[in-house]
Structures are given as C-alpha cells and as structure tokens.
Image (cartoon, rainbow, N blue to C red):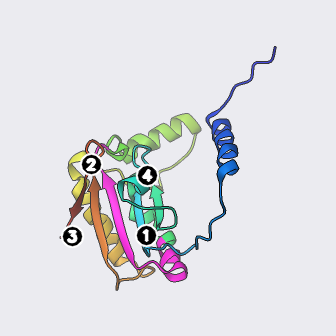
Amino acid sequence: MTNVTTTAIDGILEANQEFVKTYEARDLLARPAKKVAIVACMDARIDPFRCLGLAEGDAHIIRNAGGRVIEALRSLSISQQLLGTEEVAIIHHTACGMATFTDAEIRTRLRENLGADADHIAFLPFSAKEIDESVRADLAIYRRSPIVRQDIPVRGFVYDVETGALREVLPD
C-alpha cells in the first residue's frame, strides 16, 4: 500500500480541473473595466473582490505583505502606463501580521532557519497602533515616486477584518 500525501497545491490543481469544466472563455480585457488599481495585503482573510464589490475584470489587485506601496510601484506603473488605470486605492487592515514582528526578529529567524543574511532588506513592519500612519506613509511614498501618475486620485484605507468595514485615512 502506497502512502500518498496530498498537498494544498494538489487540492488547488484538483479544484482547477473542476473549474475548467464549467469555465466559459470570456472576452475580458487586460485593462480593468473600472480603471482602478488596488494595493492590498496578502492576508488570506481579505477577499478584495467581495469586500469591495468588484467582479472579475474590474480592477488590478496588487497584493503583498502589509499592502505596502513601495513593493507595488513597479506594478502600478505598468498598470497605469500600459493598461489604463486612473485611480489607486491603498488598503491596509486591522490585526495585520506585519504588526507582530520587527525587522530584527525576521532577520534573526531567516539567519537561524535558512542561514540567510537579510540585513539589507526592509520588511516594513508597523505596530497595530500605527495602522493609520502606515497608510499615510504609503500615500507619501506614492506621491514621491517619479514612476507613477501624480494626476489621478490616490486614496488610503484601513479594512477592519472583524467587521468588514473600510475606513478612509486622510493624508497629513
């Protein structure tokens, strides 16, 4: 008897096979219909399509740890220059994992677990009390970048993972 371990990726592949059975090729364009790009955290509790009322093809969703803009600038510039987005929403959230460590702690863990020197990497954590400030900092980073449009609306928000509510954070 063979002991076969099914991984999460195996489950994803099986689910994709089921999806393909009912998939109807759509004529969606690479250009998002609502002409908006959203920078959000990769947190698995957040479904940007559901919580923002978006459908497939409506928006570019750029996700990373903490929803940090500095890591999204390359994607935003492509989204704007080549694919026509004309608005940007930056969304951080409550109870974010980025508030659970410091740069020193993650660097130590990487050194101990992988033997990796990550002293040159800014992981950009923030405290739970500084969530509004992290949004403001990202708005400021966006506004200082020469590779993204400065003539379009760029707004920042905090998503509450307990209530699902989105709250706007105004820049300083």
In 3D space, how far apart are the residues under numbered discs 4 and 1 (Cα atoms)?
17 Å
Q: Which sits in the foreground, 12 or 98?
A: 12
Q: Secondary structure at mark 2?
A: loop
Residue 75, disc: none
Q: Are marks 4 and 3 in contact (CB under 8 Å)?
A: no
The residue that mark 2 highlights is 160
In 3D space, how far apart are the residues under numbered discs 4 and 3 (Cα atoms)?
21 Å
Q: Nearer the viewer, mark 4 or mark 1?
A: 1
The residue that mark 3 highlights is 171
Q: Amino acid at mark 4?
A: Ala
**Number of other residues with Cα within 10 Å of mark 3, as a class: few under 14, some 14 to 19, many 20 or more:** some
Q: Secondary structure at mark 4?
A: helix
Q: Secondary structure at mark 3?
A: loop
- Numbered marks: total: 4
Q: Secondary structure at mark 1?
A: strand
The residue that mark 4 highlights is 65
User: Is the residue 83 above or below the residue 165 in the image?
Assistant: below
Q: Is residue 97 shown left or right of residue 10?
A: left
Q: Amino acid at mark 3?
A: Pro
Q: Is residue 112 magenta?
A: no
In 3D space, how far apart are the residues under numbered discs 3 and 2 (Cα atoms)?
19 Å
User: Is the residue 60 above or below the residue 101 in the image?
Assistant: below
Whether residue 75 can be seen here: yes
**Number of other residues with Cα within 10 Å of mark 2, as a class: few under 14, some 14 to 19, many 20 or more:** some
Q: Position of residue 116 (x, y in %)?
A: 56, 44
Picture quarter with the C terminus: bottom left
The residue that mark 1 highlights is 37
Q: Residue at x 61, y 35 (%)?
A: 8
Q: Amino acid at mark 2?
A: Asp
Q: Which circle's residue, 4 or 2, is located before the other in the chain?
A: 4
Q: Nearer the viewer, mark 4 or mark 2?
A: 2
